[in-house]
Amino acid sequence: MPYTPFLWHRSTKSGHSRNNDSYCPSSKFAVASADHVISRPNPETVWQPTNMKTTKIKAANRSALLIIFKNSIFLLISRPHQQNPKIFVENSKYLDNTMIYTYPCCRIRYYYIRQNRAKLSNKYWIIWNLSPQRAVMKVAGFNVNSLRARLPIVLGWLEKHQPDVLALQETKVQDIDFPDEAFEKTGYEYAFKGQKSYNGVAIFAKSKVEDVQCGFENDPKDASRLITAEINGVAVVNTYVPQGYLPESEKFDYKLEWFDRLLSFFERNFKPTDPVIWLGDFNIAPSPIDVYDPDALLGHVCYHPEVHKALDKVLRWGFVDVFRMHCKNAEQYTFWDYRARGSVRRNLGWRLDHIMATRPLAEKSTASYIDKEPRLAERPSDHTPIVAEFDWPPPSKTDD
């Protein structure tokens, strides 16, 4: 895999604060902030310093420091003619896990080691990440509650965040009326299955969307609630689970049966060792920290002991809650009811939307978060996107 350099500097010119990061406008390389570069190590890659070349340093009055930190390589170069530059990387307890090499032209004398970021004391520094950059697969789920009504929000979110995969639920549009023209301009491939006024699922991807299947194998197929596709070697299963209406209703029994059918679907089509992502609106808040008032809401069809059992059975087949791998905090919600006055302002929410992954894929997850901004937009859905990022595809043998 070729090297991907990242350049960064701290500007103190007029109009810039010393505490603001700004990018090198003249750089022909890709740019990223220092925090981004140093906080994304590549733990599977091992590099030997003997393989490095020093020809990149040509200015006699520059100083450089090569850091191999947690198997990532960073080359730090001072601005030209800057005398006696220093790098302060705090927290010396990490010194034992770090190898530091200086070139003959270096004038760096003082350093400490910190796990995640560098504090730079000079006006200009360039941080050059010499580690091979792993591909990041960004996956998002979003219940749009009518795709045509939320089309500007969805298109704007796609353009701004550029997910590799976006799974939509409750599109509420029959196939003949799907807004193809709007999405063809985005460059995404997509597949969808809908019906008029209710349900509806869709998958968008930057890569090819292959082996698309809609619904269960047996009746009722519920094709507008379940769509599966293979994207970049990962099976993506997008579901809009029935809400359940009332615990004493037949619809609630159907919801429980739906999870049983879904478990059978996974058992027939996949293995827990396969790379599988299951995401969508599950209409379940799994734990007390996933609802704003767990005591008052216990027994609701989306926060009920029976649906918790049903979900747990599917998870035990081999899924991991990716969001909870990265965030243990309460009050992290994806749904705020329109009918509750001031629900967003008061944060009266539920975490009903989820991204689950089989363990081999979950172990490659690097981040997961909820983006509340679309819920604050004009004419929003009552849900908001949930996102997960994965170090995928895995490195090939030739990469290492």
Image (cartoon, grey):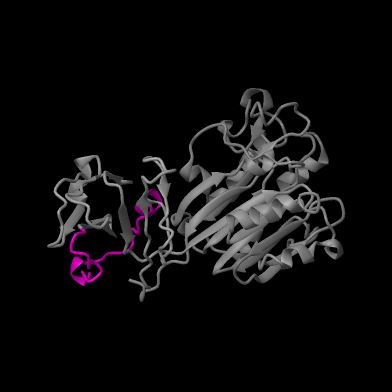
* Residue at left offset 57%, top offset 50%: 387
In the image, residue 184 lies at what x, y percent?
A: 73, 68
On the question of residue 263 being in view, the answer is no
* Residue at left offset 74%, top offset 61%: 215
Instruction: Give the answer, above or below, for where 268 lies relative to 373.
Output: below
* Residue at left offset 62%, top offset 31%: 291
In the image, residue 31 lies at what x, y percent?
A: 42, 59
In the image, residue 104 lies at what x, y percent?
A: 12, 62
On the question of residue 248 being in view, the answer is yes
Outermost residue, top side: 296
From the viewer's perspective, tell me whether residue 241 is left or right of residue 64: right
Residue in front for this viewpoint, 270 or 173:
173
In the image, residue 220 lies at what x, y percent?
A: 80, 58
From the viewer's perspective, tell me whether residue 207 is left or right of residue 300: left
> Residue 36 magenta-drawn?
yes
Residue in front for this viewpoint, 392 or 65:
65
> Residue 131 magenta-drawn?
no
Tell me the magenta residue range: 35-62
